[in-house]
Amino acid sequence: MAQSVPAIPTDPDHLVEDIATDAEERVSVATQWQLMWWRFKQHRLGVFSGVVIVIFYLVVVFADLLAYVDPAQSEALRSLIAPQPIHWFDNGQFRPHVYALAGKRDPLTFKRVYEPDPERKIPITLFARGFEYKLLGMVPTDVHLIGLAGAPPEEGLYLLGTDLQGRDMWSRLMLGTRTSLTIGLLGVAISLFLGVLLGGLSGLYGGWVDTLIQRIIEITRSIPTIPLWMGLAAAVPNSWNVTQIYFSITIIISLIGWTELGRVVRGRFLSLREEDFVLAAELAGASQWRIIFRHMVPSFLSHIIAATTLALPAMIISETALSFLGLGLRPPAVSWGVLLQDAQNVQSLAISPWLLAAAIPVIIIILAFNFLGDGLRDAADPYGV
Amino acid sequence: MTSNPNSVHSNNSVNSVENAPLLEVRGLKMHFPIRRGFLQRTVGHVRAVDDVNFFIQPGETLALVGESGCGKTTTARCILRALDPTAGEVLFRTDDGRAVNLAAIPRKQLRPWRQHMQMIFQDPYASLNPRMTLADIVGEPLLVNGMRDRQARNDRVAELLRLVGLRPEYMQRYPHAFSGGQRQRIGVARALALNPSLVVADEAVSALDVSVQAQILNLLMELQERLGLTYLFVAHDLSVVKHISDRIAVMYVGKIVELAPTRRVFSVPKHPYTEALLSAVPIPNPRVHSQRILLEGDVADPSKPPPGCYFHPRCRYAVERCRIEPPPLVEVESGHYAACHRATELTLRGVMGRETGQN
Amino acid sequence: MEPILTVDNLKTYFFQSEGTVKAVDGASFEVYPGQTLGLVGESGCGKSITARSILRLVDKPGRIVDGSIQYYPANGGQALELTELPSDGATMREIRGKDIALIFQEPMTSFSAHYSVGNQIMEAIRIHDRGLSQQAARARAVDLLRKTGVPMAEQRLDMYSFQLSGGLRQRVMIAMALACTPRILIADEPTTALDVTTQAQILALLKDLQRSFGMAIILITHDMGVIAEMADEVAVMYLGRVVERGPVDQIFHAPRHPYTRALLRSIPSIDGEPRTKLPTIRGSIPHPYSRPQGCPFHPRCLERIAGVCDQHEPALARMADGQAVACFLHHREEIRQN
């Protein structure tokens, strides 16, 4: 064989030579997070959703700044005002203002009707004074992003109208957003903790630990959600205050949520245990501890982040559904579910559809989290081809 | 098993007489339980490795060949204690001349022994953690064995990279920047980091392209000469094995059926399975048409092997005795072992010199 | 002899966001009835994509951008230009399976785990022969399994793919491909996942079947040993291009292209001396995104002509003896004209 092939000059030095361009060099030294980011950036919808989510969480942080009326303040004389148009120009000049409303009772239907008075223009200003609160939970202040010049905002500003008790919908929506989104975040955090802990134990130790945890997961998942929630929510004492109920509801919804994450973590551990690079580390003498935290955890961290993002909307929906059914948060707490509870009867919907306003952010945030999760999941494994 | 190949290693032509073997495997067994049903009852065992005996001299290359499922990889992993063998001894000779039975050491106390034997993997993609730089991958064995100083570690990594033909400047790169062949070089560098005396190469070139495969084979041979390494080379490709090994052990369904110096295995095989295996290798020369021995049927199931010789249902030389009595591995000629009742009476066809006369 | 299939200057590109991968970038060869064409090359040389292009099975973002694939039907009618047929049209579906069949490297993934293998073979038979009764189709399937050397064919018909060994699965796969007695069988690495002894069985089977059915085989592999044993004609591919083509004996004993020569020398041979160094090809196969300019092999070529090979791409030119080679060493006239 060797004799039949014509001789060619051989190259004794087979050092692997290649000249990398700058672009290739940049890729060569890129960490997994950089690679993921480059990949994620190509998922336009994911990036856009990420921006939307950031805006929502800015609302969470600055909810009281964005609200302009104390959301608990009710006034029967201002019940069910429709959303009020803003007039941007006054005689050709940019001067946003609203018309003052005069409420009176319709002599035929006995409904309260509100008539704008074009003669009484109330200018809208930025950084007006209103109810007192603590900015970021620390700085006591009474400054709000918007307000009215020369009138208390509760007497003239109704951006999204008012509810039956005359409470301002815009302000309530801001604070409801805070409650609903933090409950989701907190619920996911608890789920994540339980999921990673139990899933990790299950995947790492195997044997009877694995069997036990898997059976627990199966049993938990086989219980119908709504009756379970109803049972648990009924067990929450009526005497508890808002904060206590808030935390108990969080724990109730995360009890269901952890199972999915637990499965993901267990599956990752099981498949990673078989990876050659894990065996290589073991043969090099690396400790169990090092193998888990240097090799295994970084390998599935990105997947966990994606799975968490996809688990968040379920949490938010759970809270909204529970509260809507009257099983979750109860007034005086404000959340999207509590707000939607007011829109439960058909009559109020027909007359005052703005009570449904809370449904819009629910839809937007759920879609945004799903798109973001999709984008992250696609980018989570930048090494798979 | 009646024979003991270890008692006669002074006959081995490759190494000096006074050298004791670096590694000796005695009666190695690895049986995996088959579990069924809800209660996970054990209903049988897969005899992946079933009484394997061999030794490796310092500085030599022993190849373990066989087809998929023959237990060659399991044998290698038992030796490295990636698996805990069911039975048997893995005797490793230390620098001071003692033989330590690695199979009996508890997992937690293995670390000091691990650095003496390292592994090169088949898949250059799966065996390097994609989330670590070369410096971290190649430096990991150093770090976990006590070299805490990063600068010292990087110096050693640079030296290792140069040794395997990679530029040390690439140290901060991630594996995704490299081709399959280059990654395999990284794997070799990692295996050599702790100055092991035994390197187990598990199908180290079978995932590579032909043109790159030759580079890695040459590299392995070069490193062996320079560093005095001992190789256990696990492979299924006989052509590759021939280029690198001093002796070859052929495995079939968990047992070694033939063990001899490379040249002898290829020129005068003593086991019918080896003969069939050799004849099946396609020759890259259209003018040579080998007389194929086409084996009937499939490889025996290692969970319920046939009685007698495991190969007898497919063997064209099988006689009544082969169906009843399992043949032991015996020394047929000096340094040439075969597990076949008819090893001495049969004249089997090898491949050496087959081509000459035809061209 | 008249060819049954002619592929001329085929180009199949993949348009990805990271860049365009020229998976096939100028492949030309002919296939003759009853003969075996070996398509050989290393990973990324485009041999599998060439096969998929012939069957019009290239998935997005891949697209045939240039070249022609002429298929000459059995009735001696007009040659069909396969690149111009809609890939999902009736003609193309008719050709796939009935005229040109494909077998893959990994038989496991080519079968559905939800139907017995017999079910799947019978389905393949009845897609192209709708009038056939259930019983007749079953009889044909059993017959096919017997022809492909499956023992206990009747029982095996009712088994599922995961119950079969790798060798048997590949036999069943071949039986399925032969269901409609195709005129061309494309075998894409048919034995790569198999052990050598099983490989020997399958190769012998393919030869037997070719003899009795008279079909043409396009054998795609990276294994020069398999090529030497099976092929009549060989096309060597490198980075999407056919760099050399000719009768098998000439390719192995008088290779012209430096790549073919280097490749042949770097193969470890079972006839070689133990413990010898192998000649190597330096460097590695470039990443598909960074194809070198000029001749794709020039960065690894020891005989490259500076200023020529790194500037111009050599065309596949036919030599006097019927061998064709794409290398400036062998047609210097062309350089002067440039």
Image (cartoon, helix red, strand yellow):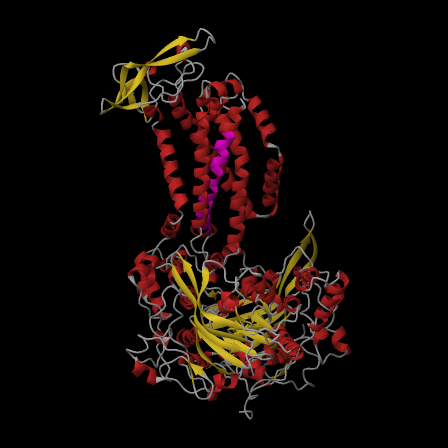
Q: Nearer the viewer, residue B197 or C302?
A: C302
Residue A78, given in percent of the width and then of the height, sits at: 39, 12
In this rendering, the count of numbered labels is 0
Position of B298 with respect to B240 (left or right) is right
Residue at image position (76%, 65%) is C136
Front-lying residue, A163 or A254: A163
Q: Height in image: C252 above or below C59?
A: below
In the picture as drawn, the residue positioned furthest to the top comes out as A107
A163 vs A275, nearest the viewer: A163
Task: Tell me the residue at 39%/71% (across/down).
Answer: C284
Please tell me whether residue C12 is drawn above or below residue A150 in the rendered image: below
Looking at the magenta stretch, what is its main secondary structure?
Answer: helix
Q: Quadrant of residue A234?
A: top right
Q: Quadrant of residue B87?
A: bottom right
Image location of residue B291, percent across then percent down: 63, 84
Q: Residue furthest front?
A: C78
Q: Tell me residue C151's x, y (percent).
A: 73, 70
Q: Which residues are magenta?
A: A296-319
Residue B275: x percent and y percent?
63, 80
Query: Can residue B121 be seen here?
Result: yes
Confirm whether residue A330 shows in the render.
no
Is A312 magenta? The answer is yes
Task: In the displayed orientation, state which residue is furthest to the bottom.
Answer: B357
* Residue C275 magenta: no
Residue B130 location, quadrant: bottom left
Q: In the picture provided, is B316 more to the left or to the right than C268?
A: right
Compared to residue A87, the image places residue C5 above or below, namely: below
